[in-house]
Amino acid sequence: MYRSRLKGKLDKDALKFLSSISDDLALLYYDIVGSEAHSVMLYENGLIKQQELKKILNALEGVKKQDLKKLASEEYEDIHEAVEAYVVEKAGMDSGGKMHTARSRNDQVALDIRMKIRDDINDICREMLALIDTLVKKAEQNKDSAMIMYTHLQHAQIGTFSHYLLSYADALFRDLDRLYICYGRVNQSPLGACAIGGTSIKIDRRKTASLLGFDSLVENSIDATTARDFMVEFCFGLAMIMLDLSRVAEDFVLWSSSEFNYVELADEFTSSSSVMPQKKNPCPLELMRAKASMSLGLLMSLMGTVKSLPSGYSRDLQDTKHILWQSISIAKDSLKLMRFIIESLKVNKKIMFESAQNSYAVSLDIAEELVKKGIAFRQAHKIVGSLVKTASDSKKSLAALNEQEIKSVIGKDFPAEELAKIIKSVDPKSSLEARVSLGSPNPKEQERMISDRKLKANGYRKGIEKRAKQVSDAFDSLEKNVRSQLS
Amino acid sequence: MYRSRLKGKLDKDALKFLSSISDDLALLYYDIVGSEAHSVMLYENGLIKQQELKKILNALEGVKKQDLKKLASEEYEDIHEAVEAYVVEKAGMDSGGKMHTARSRNDQVALDIRMKIRDDINDICREMLALIDTLVKKAEQNKDSAMIMYTHLQHAQIGTFSHYLLSYADALFRDLDRLYICYGRVNQSPLGACAIGGTSIKIDRRKTASLLGFDSLVENSIDATTARDFMVEFCFGLAMIMLDLSRVAEDFVLWSSSEFNYVELADEFTSSSSVMPQKKNPCPLELMRAKASMSLGLLMSLMGTVKSLPSGYSRDLQDTKHILWQSISIAKDSLKLMRFIIESLKVNKKIMFESAQNSYAVSLDIAEELVKKGIAFRQAHKIVGSLVKTASDSKKSLAALNEQEIKSVIGKDFPAEELAKIIKSVDPKSSLEARVSLGSPNPKEQERMISDRKLKANGYRKGIEKRAKQVSDAFDSLEKNVRSQLS
Amino acid sequence: MYRSRLKGKLDKDALKFLSSISDDLALLYYDIVGSEAHSVMLYENGLIKQQELKKILNALEGVKKQDLKKLASEEYEDIHEAVEAYVVEKAGMDSGGKMHTARSRNDQVALDIRMKIRDDINDICREMLALIDTLVKKAEQNKDSAMIMYTHLQHAQIGTFSHYLLSYADALFRDLDRLYICYGRVNQSPLGACAIGGTSIKIDRRKTASLLGFDSLVENSIDATTARDFMVEFCFGLAMIMLDLSRVAEDFVLWSSSEFNYVELADEFTSSSSVMPQKKNPCPLELMRAKASMSLGLLMSLMGTVKSLPSGYSRDLQDTKHILWQSISIAKDSLKLMRFIIESLKVNKKIMFESAQNSYAVSLDIAEELVKKGIAFRQAHKIVGSLVKTASDSKKSLAALNEQEIKSVIGKDFPAEELAKIIKSVDPKSSLEARVSLGSPNPKEQERMISDRKLKANGYRKGIEKRAKQVSDAFDSLEKNVRSQLS
Amino acid sequence: MYRSRLKGKLDKDALKFLSSISDDLALLYYDIVGSEAHSVMLYENGLIKQQELKKILNALEGVKKQDLKKLASEEYEDIHEAVEAYVVEKAGMDSGGKMHTARSRNDQVALDIRMKIRDDINDICREMLALIDTLVKKAEQNKDSAMIMYTHLQHAQIGTFSHYLLSYADALFRDLDRLYICYGRVNQSPLGACAIGGTSIKIDRRKTASLLGFDSLVENSIDATTARDFMVEFCFGLAMIMLDLSRVAEDFVLWSSSEFNYVELADEFTSSSSVMPQKKNPCPLELMRAKASMSLGLLMSLMGTVKSLPSGYSRDLQDTKHILWQSISIAKDSLKLMRFIIESLKVNKKIMFESAQNSYAVSLDIAEELVKKGIAFRQAHKIVGSLVKTASDSKKSLAALNEQEIKSVIGKDFPAEELAKIIKSVDPKSSLEARVSLGSPNPKEQERMISDRKLKANGYRKGIEKRAKQVSDAFDSLEKNVRSQLS
């Protein structure tokens, strides 16, 4: 439609290569709403007549009823052209031809993307809160789930399964907060920046921004049409979610192995093997790790695309949509599935406890008891290290060492009898109760944190719904305006 | 179909998350052929009866006629299950239930992927040769296209447009060679490795390999089912193509700017603007740069997916298909479009020549003339550097400097009169003719290289077609075998 | 020092492979301060005696005077071990051996990194503000620098060089804000989380946090020792800066080519060629693009490292320091150099203006004039598009078209005479003055934005200095405390 | 030294930013040798006099004795300038000033890099062969190490530890082959391409290539100075090695956990904890995973750097050296350490066997026995699946199921008595012996593969040493030539 200077149509293969129509369908709704707001503003500022406005709005209503497949039939390079062509055809050149006054696809596509991902951010934040709720609830149900905690995949200290769940929730809160803040940078209107340098037509940028529920403007016209950092930041935020989910997935894949056997996925979230009848594979978790890699690669594609690009719109930017849409799907689907998996997860508390009891993971607890008796920690560390060596060489637990054995190891560093008592007094339960530091898996600390995280989640929930309402109120209001023009 | 140990079906969302059916449709043909070869081998080794073979082959024929959409209706986790389920249904459990004897999805999917990308490599190599042909031909038509050559985007030496085209061809030859070698690593059969550890059934791995046109086997059963390096290497090869195309695209985007104005894309490969009527945007080239970033990101996704994965199949590997398919499409489409663009490219030789003539890009030629008169190069470099400074300060060309000006710059380092003559004798044409080093843009060197590259391309062409024939002969032979069983 | 359970020393090659000492030297200062605060807290909570505290603090003073090279002589796996070993040696096991009470390297290294990058963020924010100041000042000096604006590297609209500079400033403000917010997530103390599960010793986590100038705690002990998202977010923020700088670099590389010739780098920021005497290469800008790629790769390394890592410290995390330190250097150096380059940049306003005047970049302005006369924009776009085609076919400017030519193109769509007048009335200067939309390069809009950005920069400056003061006040206070103990 | 056109020196910060001297030190040796060969060629082609040659060679000898630190003292932008400046100073402008005749830093740096990484490839190939030797030898010692094989980290089939080791060797063979082929693309001389367009001086490119031990030339002068695909391909090859090592590392980290307890790292390759006395952490393996991520990020940096770069040398390319040097170190160090770790690895065969015996990993073996009795595999899969379900519900092994239980599960599908016999006859040892397919962990297959891999390694070894000799012969010959000139 715009090829007045160029001869003939685009080559068929070139059109196929260039067209973003299939990615653009996700923008169609926003493109229409954006065009409505722009047209209303043009009318309110005397730039088009009421009769022209009506025809435009009427044609835009028609687009809504269009068959998407037909629209996407690759006749146009993008959705903006498709919509305008329809409007010009239906409303006539004299009216429809005015819709694109003081607007370019360059500010228009930035506008559409911002409106779409504004909604996406809210949706994903809701999914995150649902997952956080599930984690906190599952933690609440498992406060007493004593288990070994691992560093370097080696036995470290006694902890609880619930403490792990709470640590996931805390990480997700930060991921959530990153998206929450990103929203502020997304929710600014670029409309009116036009191609790159604004316009001589007396438009009202603040008016369209307000009609569309934006907080403010991306002022500088070059910046408004060039910048994609809001997309990159969002894409990064999504990748961060996936990194955290990949960690949860890894923990659970390990723990659902026969060797750990701490948790068991519900059957409906596992796959079997085509040849090995005994298999119960934690496939969705494995795939979530792959999706995290996918998400990283997409971020890299996006950042690589904008790197060293000159200022002003370049067609390279078209692919940023395709990349981001994929990232959004990955995060949405993964968050949801992780929630289902955790909700239905079977926790083998008994096995967890026995493993803890039979491990050397209480070593630090013993060393700390020695510290309380006045031994320097570094010395206590050495004493217990030697005990572990002795015990493990003879494949015994620490509690199974007799006084003689203890004495032969520690000499006169500490009374063997007293140490033997200390060792016997330490078990997973006592270990957890003795843990007094803030943020530890001590049952009371867990309770405090559970209450606190519930409050925190509610705070975010309110903020998100308030934002969502600001947008839906603006859209409702715009729709009423449109209706009243058309009635 | 395989959930004998597990209760009930997969959760609906989990199935959607896990299913690779849509990516698998690209494997369907290969899955069927692979199953045919496997079944024929089972029969020939006395592991199933002829009647059973017939039923299986008949059912597989049925799959070929199946509606793809129905097959992909997300009822199954993957194409292998879908096909086997169909075969068991049609051929009955007694016969159809034997098709999966001594085979697992783990070796099967590796087999299917290898067969598919074997064809993809050949296809892409053909596309590369077509592009190389076009480059060489376009170079042949433009051997006399004197133009400035750039380093740091600054004027460097006099060269020709055709010399650039030949440099692209040479880079593409290396890209081609990488895929050509990768083919050897792809064309090995994993079939018979089963789940991870082979089988106690007396199969003949060499037989199935031969029936399917493979050169050899991936022997070790863990390796055969775990390794995806053949996919990564291919994906890397595709990214390398895109890197080279992104460079060509960048050169052409620059040269088609108004400021350079050396080349002009045919109208059918440019887009216009929705607001700026004068625009003629080189969109496909810009997008090709973005696709190069996409290709890099995909490579990163793929490598990130296999990083630190334990040995043996993990579900993470499923996503490697999705990633690679995307990479393949990007490279195929981009190669084709680049060929069209170059074929139809308008070369503004006159402007190229004038820019060359008015530039300081002959400075090195002048310095080398001084060298031939016995001046040390470093000294000659200084002399000409000072001349350029004087000339550029007064916005003159070197040829416009008079003897007096030259003398004031160089003093007694060299006779000014003689230098003035040298300067005047050097122009783009003489510069190119004087260039004597092997591989330079000297017209005769170009002619030599053009002939040579044509031969080289033909050599690859023969090799590729020979390989393709090996596969198609094997497939034809297998099909005859199947037909004879079914008749 | 900790190998009580293990036989003998680390293998020499393994030590070299494992040691992070060289990266750790950047943490030494923070490690000492952190140990001081921890020891003071232990004393204040009755966990060590004053005499023991004195000995520890005295030994820590000794570390400060140590020869860094000796410390880094690869005898230790990391700086924490090196420092503790020194303290135990100097203060004796009875006192020095108590320093590590209720602390692990796992929370300690997280603490040190957080303290270091807290300072780094402030430093980089200051560098960013200095660059923003320079951009705004340079813009102020060049408000009248009419030039062509580009989209797709093709002539788009008339703008100004200063408007570009302001768009860079606006992008950098967002980059700045991202770091500014990241600081909040960094400035939380993990100390007291110990190995992974807290401690049974009655420490006061809030006290150490306050002694070290932190805002709050990372509560959950697993989270505090596992999470590296604060590093990833910072690394991402740095990559975003580099992406924006790469864009500025690309613009300037293009504009300093002979073909554009809009800007000229000061000689002291360009390199010459070893053979081509005429060269003046914008090397620092080119290298800045490479550094942006480096920065992306580092981000990918970092994110890839934490992907799918199980909860709890794993040694993989060690390399995150090396990665981040590199990213920090890249951003710091690049910001500084970009500032110098812009400060000393020569702007060729005359050439800019002439290029603008001779271009078709006023086409949209003309079309908008037609709109003001009542022509539908889409129609106006067509009219001007046809005019450009006619003009460019005969290599004329639009202003050079005579009425007859205009008429032959536009027929009766619009009076040719009137259109000819419009065309003649539009030049770069009038175009800019007519541009009325908010955020356009209109001189008054620029003035408004310049004032506004100055205010905005000052706001950030105050916030950063306030934060820096909170940290330095805490450190001063701690130092006094230490001094008083030692005196 | 080259700034004849430019005023004054580089800005100090710019010099620091631009200088690659520290990375270049690794090239110094090659730069000197390259300059020797170039000078000898100039002399042999009558382009410089013997006396001049002698002075140049003499000065180059002086560079060899230079203090590297002084050379790297950041006075020069790169090593090429530093060396030439020294030569001009020592040999005088009249002679030394001729060394750079018909040469540019653009072809020179490509030459130096190619010579350096030619050696690096050989070194790394040698390290790979040493690791492969170790793997094969360790496999040979552990042919009888029955253990569970895993897919999805779940029990799959019975295999052996040695079979895993052999699968690593096979993957490494492919990694080796990739580098082996890459060498061919590296070992081509770019010298004589000059800045970008060759020279009018009658040089002999084939002569310098031969003097320096190259196989052939990179002909096209643009290609020779622009292309970095040989570096990218090498960097990719290194990343592929690291991906395979990361997998080995992951397997061993898992298997050295208390839960698996299959292998134990020698004490000298493990680290302890600063607080948990019982810890024995597999730190080098964890770090190797991180290094794999580092290696991927470096590849991304490198590919991102060359993406969309225009043809001809741009300063961006400077950073490719820094990136590649890091990749090389990572791979070299990791290969060596992995070799040490495997050599000293303790294998807990007894625990492996017991785990195998107590698992359901024989399920497929049982199903295959049923197949041999005529049951369709899909049916056999169902039967055994149901048995596993029954057994696992009551936490029994399959062998512990009595006939009654078996009957209740399978009904009349198969005689329960016979099935019970089959189950009892299957154990890890019989399972391995029954495995007959090519490439399975059957002891005889392993022996065959071990012999074969030894031969294969020797083949590569010979090829590598032959290549190395070609280079060292050329260098020796050149040195003699230089000596004879200087004597």
Image (tube, coloured by chain):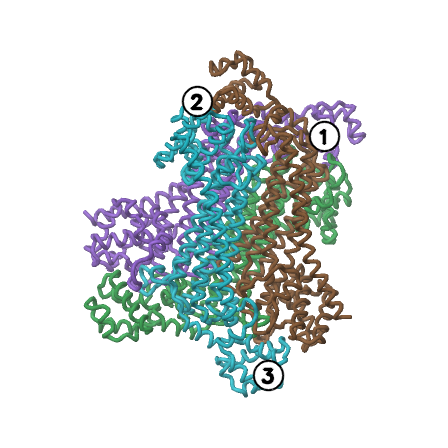
Chain colours: A green, B brown, C purple, D cyan
Q: Which mark is residue D94?
A: 2
Residue that carries the numbered disc 1 in the rendered image = C388
Identity, as a three-letter code, of the amino acid under mark 2: Asp
What's the CA distance linking mark 3 and mark 1?
Answer: 84 Å
Identity, as a three-letter code, of the amino acid under mark 3: Ile
Q: Nearer the viewer, residue C262 or C23?
A: C23
Q: Given the current orientation, which residue lies at the most extreme top position?
A: B404
Q: Nearer the viewer, residue A455 or C40?
A: C40
Quarter of the rendering containing residue A102: top right
Picture coordinates of residue D417, whole percent (x, y)? 56, 87
Residue ID at (28%, 59%): C101
Picture coordinates of residue A110, whole percent (x, y)? 61, 44
Residue that carries the numbered disc 3 in the rendered image = D410
Q: What secondary structure is found at the residue carrying circle 2?
A: helix
Residue ID at (20%, 68%): A411
- Residue C465 to residue C143: above or below: below
Picture coordinates of residue D2, whole percent (x, y)? 46, 26
Question: Which circle's residue, 2 or 3, is located before the other in the chain?
Answer: 2
What's the CA distance linking mark 2 and mark 3?
Answer: 98 Å
Q: Nearer the viewer, residue A160 or D2?
A: D2
Q: Are marks 3 and 1 on the same chain?
A: no
